[in-house]
């Protein structure tokens, strides 16, 4: 079983329909430096899949002898797909950020059935990490990734790549050409300063400028390939990447764009983007590719944007009977289901139990790279995780975060992935009560990190001026200490939760046992289902033997 954090986080199911349905997986957001309070560029990533194990990967910088070949391993299957020439020197990589503060995230999408399965050597995970190892800017990463795909072929399905550095943020969407056609078609757009965008398992780039290389790049055959296949016959200027290669349908609105909408509606409420944009009632409304937030955002604001269950919207999962007695805003898989001959689906929110890990990356060009690159890293569900600061200048990661500690099929108290999942599972069982405790602990830990951030970075910069390696050692010690602290704290917190809510009761600090009443809607549902059978003082009818 492949446990690498870059594994593909969704299984692609092929059907005879025009567009293959996606096991809806990862979400990503980018915020340009002009839209943030401190001038940092930010990227978020929710790595969502029920079979994914979360860990924080660290790859040190390295030098390579001439003639060395780099293995290309399929991130889904672990299969050796081939080899490409290695370069003389590679950058260090912490998670999805390299030592030059370049960050790359992704969100998968399926496309026309004619393009599946794709044909080639390089899958999306290989492209991401090869680019992180070899390039220092978003533009360089795009040029390298697309060149490698053209030279060696592209083996994944559709991908929306979020690619950013301290100065620029780019959204690149790519899809393979299908069996027998080497390479990929793609388009990349630079976000205007002061804006943000998001991706959630569907291509989002529609029309794009054909002669603006400073802000838009695309494969030479992105339009001609569609014409050759008979998928497009209009004018070049009207060509829409998403409409041709990943057409919008009901599922696209309700299960993918709805997550983008939930970010946009909260970041820019002045735009008045109502639920009609994603409720499937009309397929002619489109969200913009990016929006300008009503105010500049902090890292805490960005974290809040990806901690979302559609609260107080028509899609709020905590209100219907599926929420159970304690208003749970989650639904267990499968995503699609049927009963009595009709097909249904569960809402797909940004916060989900399927998340293995997530991060909020900050890239800050006014600081030395080792200090400016900051990965706020968390395990499991975004709503319940603790984002812990991991600086890109570190030389190792906390032992409980690292590769090889455990895996998806073996529980371990040494694994932060398992400890966070254990606490989250307790919250899911009694959401409305336990989430209050979780939020209190989460806020205290994260609040401490933010309170000390300025002093930590001031010290790191002073050390860097004298000796860059001393600064890296300082940041390594700090980041590892915080990771160790979070792991130990969360395990102890989980033990306290277990005692407090033992057997469905609630134990106060004084030892008193309480029995909080579930929500009214739950009791009313029981009454509707049982009639007068449970009504106190009513003698039920006796059924003859």
Image: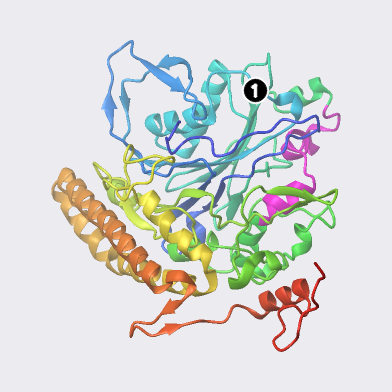
Magenta extent = 231-258
Q: Nearer the viewer, residue 424 or 244?
A: 424
Q: Does the magenta-highlighted stretch encompass residue 240? A: yes
Q: Magenta stretch mostly in which secondary structure? A: helix
Residue 378: x and y in percent read: 41, 54
Q: Quadrant of the C terminus?
A: bottom right
Q: Which residue is mark 1?
A: 118
Residue at image position (75%, 24%) is 114
Q: Is residue 92 left or right of residue 349?
A: left
Left or right placement of residue 245 versus residue 464 in this view: right
> Is residue 469 part of the magenta span, yes or no?
no
Q: Residues within 10 Å of mark 1 (few under 14, many from 20)?
A: many
Place of residue 227 in the rendered image (x, y in percent of width and height, measured from the top left): 81, 24
| Residue at 52% from the left image edge and 69% from the top image edge | 430
Name the foreground residue: 498 vs 478: 498
Taking 13 as reference, is 44 above or below it? below
Report x, y in % for residue 246.
73, 37
Q: Is residue 102 left or right of residue 169?
A: left
Q: Is residue 472 above or below residue 216?
A: below
Q: Nearer the viewer, residue 517 or 306?
A: 517
Q: Note whether 63 is above or below 267 in the view shown.
A: above
The percent coordinates of residue 483 (x first, y second) are 29, 54
Asked if residue 413 can be seen in this view, the reply is yes
Image height of 145 relative to 516, above or below: above
Q: Quadrant of residue 405?
A: top left
Residue lying furthest top: 67
Q: Is residue 364 visible?
A: no
> Which residue occupies the extreme front position in the image?
545
x 42%, y 41%: residue:
96
């Amino acid at each position: 079983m492949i446990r690498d954090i870059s594994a593909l986080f969704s299984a692609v199911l092929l059907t005879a329909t025009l567009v293959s349905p996606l096991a809806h997986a990862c979400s990503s957001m980018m915020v340009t430096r002009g839209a943030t309070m401190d001038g940092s560029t930010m990227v978020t990533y929710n790595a969502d899949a029920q079979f994914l194990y979360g860990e924080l990967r660290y790859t040190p910088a390295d030098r390579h002898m001439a003639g060395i070949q780099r293995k290309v391993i399929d991130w889904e299957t672990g299969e050796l797909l081939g080899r490409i020439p290695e370069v003389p020197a590679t950058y260090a990589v912490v998670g999805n950020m390299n030592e030059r503060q370049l960050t790359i995230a992704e969100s998968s999408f399926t496309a026309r059935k004619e393009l599946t399965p794709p044909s080639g050597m390089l899958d999306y995970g290989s492209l991401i990490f090869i680019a992180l190892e070899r390039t220092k800017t978003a533009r360089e990463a795009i040029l390298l990734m697309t060149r490698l795909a053209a030279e060696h072929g592209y083996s994944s399905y559709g991908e929306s790549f979020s690619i950013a550095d301290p100065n620029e943020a780019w959204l690149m969407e790519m899809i393979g050409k299908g069996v027998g056609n080497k390479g990929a078609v793609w388009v990349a757009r630079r976000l205007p300063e002061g804006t943000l965008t998001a991706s959630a398992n569907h291509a989002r780039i529609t029309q794009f400028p054909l002669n603006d290389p400073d802000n838009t790049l695309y494969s030479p055959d992105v339009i001609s390939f569609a014409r050759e296949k008979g998928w497009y016959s209009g004018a070049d200027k009207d060509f829409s990447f998403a409409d041709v290669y990943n057409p919008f349908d009901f599922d696209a609105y309700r299960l993918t764009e709805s997550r983008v909408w939930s970010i946009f509606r909260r970041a820019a409420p002045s735009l008045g983007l109502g639920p009609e944009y994603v409720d499937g009632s009309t397929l002619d409304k489109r969200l913009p590719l990016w929006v300008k937030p009503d105010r500049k955002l902090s890292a805490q604001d960005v974290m809040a944007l990806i901690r979302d269950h559609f609260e107080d919207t028509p899609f709020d999962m905590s209100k219907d009977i599926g929420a159970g007695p304690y208003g749970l805003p989650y639904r267990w898989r499968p995503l699609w289901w049927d009963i009595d001959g009709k097909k249904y689906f569960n809402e797909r929110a940004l916060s989900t139990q399927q998340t293995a890990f997530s991060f909020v990356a900050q890239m800050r060009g006014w600081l030395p790279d080792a200090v400016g690159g900051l990965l706020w890293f968390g395990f499991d569900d975004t709503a319940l995780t603790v984002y812990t600061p991991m600086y890109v200048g570190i030389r190792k990661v906390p032992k409980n975060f690292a590769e090889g500690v455990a895996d998806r099929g073996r529980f371990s108290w040494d694994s932060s992935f398992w400890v966070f999942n254990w606490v989250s599972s307790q919250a899911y069982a009694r959401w409305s009560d336990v989430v209050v405790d979780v939020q209190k602990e989460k806020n205290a830990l994260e609040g401490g990190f933010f309170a000390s951030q300025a002093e930590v970075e001031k010290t790191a910069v002073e050390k860097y001026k004298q000796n860059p390696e001393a600064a890296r050692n300082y940041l390594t010690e700090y980041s590892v200490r915080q990771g160790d602290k979070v792991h130990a704290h969360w395990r102890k917190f989980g033990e306290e939760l277990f005692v407090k809510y033992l057997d469905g009761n609630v134990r106060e600090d004084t030892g008193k046992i309480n029995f909080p009443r579930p929500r009214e809607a739950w009791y009313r549902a029981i009454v509707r289902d049982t009639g007068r059978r449970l009504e106190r003082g009513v003698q039920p009818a006796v059924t003859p033997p």
